[in-house]
Image: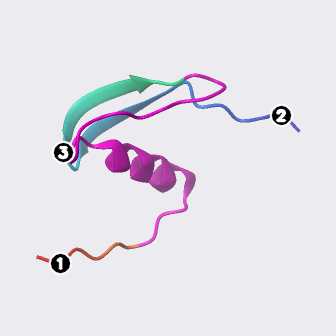
Amino acid sequence: MENLYLEDITLSNYRKFNQSTFGLNRHMNVLIGKNAAGKTTILEAVNVMLGAYRIRRYHG
């Protein structure tokens, strides 16, 4: 069985990203940014793509 590697992820109209593409390294990726920069949004988008998404409730 072959391994699956993501080369990049493109977010279009997903949460705070209108149109953004992020290149990924095959071995390790580190997301660095200020609070509310979208780091968690990128991780959630990967979860959605892989089918591991569950509905998240927001308060407010």
The image's mark for residue 59 is 1
In this picture, residue 18 sits left or right of residue 49: left
Closer to the camera in the image, 20 or 35: 35
Q: Is residue 8 magenta?
A: no
Magenta residues span 25-54
Give the amino acid type for the residue marked by disc 2 in the picture.
Glu
Residue indicated by mark 3: 16
Mark earlier in primary sequence (3, 2) = 2
Give the amino acid type for the residue marked by disc 1 in the picture.
His
Rendered residue at 34%/43% (across/down):
39
State the image coordinates of residue 40 (x, y, percent, origin top left).
36, 50
Q: Is residue 38 magenta?
A: yes
Quadrant the C terminus occupies: bottom left
Mark earlier in primary sequence (1, 2) = 2
Give the amino acid type for the residue marked by disc 3 in the picture.
Lys
10 Å crowding of disc 3: few (<14), some (14-19), many (20+):
few
10 Å crowding of disc 1: few (<14), some (14-19), many (20+):
few
State the image coordinates of residue 36 (x, y, percent, origin top left).
20, 47
Cβ–Cβ under 8 Å for marks 3 and 2: no
Mark earlier in primary sequence (3, 1) = 3
Marks 3, 2: nearer the viewer? 3
Q: Main secondary structure of the magenta part?
A: loop
Vertical comparison of 48 with 19: above or below: below
Rendered residue at 33%/49% (across/down):
41
State the image coordinates of residue 27 (x, y, percent, origin top left).
66, 26
Cβ–Cβ under 8 Å for marks 1 and 2: no
State the image coordinates of residue 45 (x, y, percent, origin top left).
41, 48
